[in-house]
Amino acid sequence: MTEDFWLINSNRSGVKRFSKNNKNKDKFFEYMFIDSGRIIGVLGKEPPLMTTREELKVDIARDEWRKLIAQGWRRTKPVWEDC
């Protein structure tokens, strides 16, 4: 099972899930998926609507994580199951 890392924006309207792509065929680089979702209704009552998925090299995904933290995003518990 892959460990996922979650962020939520400051107004609690959007979430991002960072997860390692374990099925990547590139032998030289590791990749992460960044899934983005929009919270509809009350957080926790129903899963967010998944809007996008990006696949980035791990170092670029880490830069994105740091950028989001600097913009006010915070870690949160998982808010949707497998997509």
Image (tube, rainbow, N blue to C red):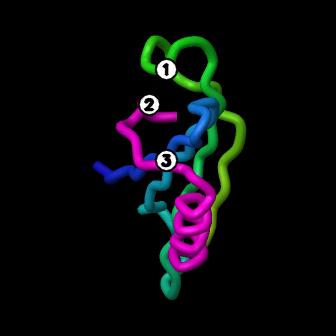
Amino acid under disc 2: Val
Segment tinted magenta in the rendering: 57-83
Is 30 situated left or right of 52 in this image? Answer: left
Outermost residue to the right: 51
Residue at mark 2: 79
Image mark for residue 43: 1
Quickly name the residue at label 3.
Answer: 7
Mark before the other along the chain sequence, 1 or 3 = 3
Element type at mark 2:
loop
Name the disc covering residue 83, or none: none
Cβ atoms under marks 1 and 3 closer than 8 Å: no
Q: Earlier in the sequence, mark 2 or mark 3?
A: 3
Residue 29 position within the rendered picture, expressed as x and y whole percent measured from the top left: 52, 82
User: Does the CB distance between marks 2 and 1 fall below 8 Å?
Assistant: yes
Q: Residue at x 32, y 53 (%)?
A: 3
Bin the neighbour count of mark 2 within 10 Å (Cα to Cα): few under 14, some 14-19, many 20 and up. some
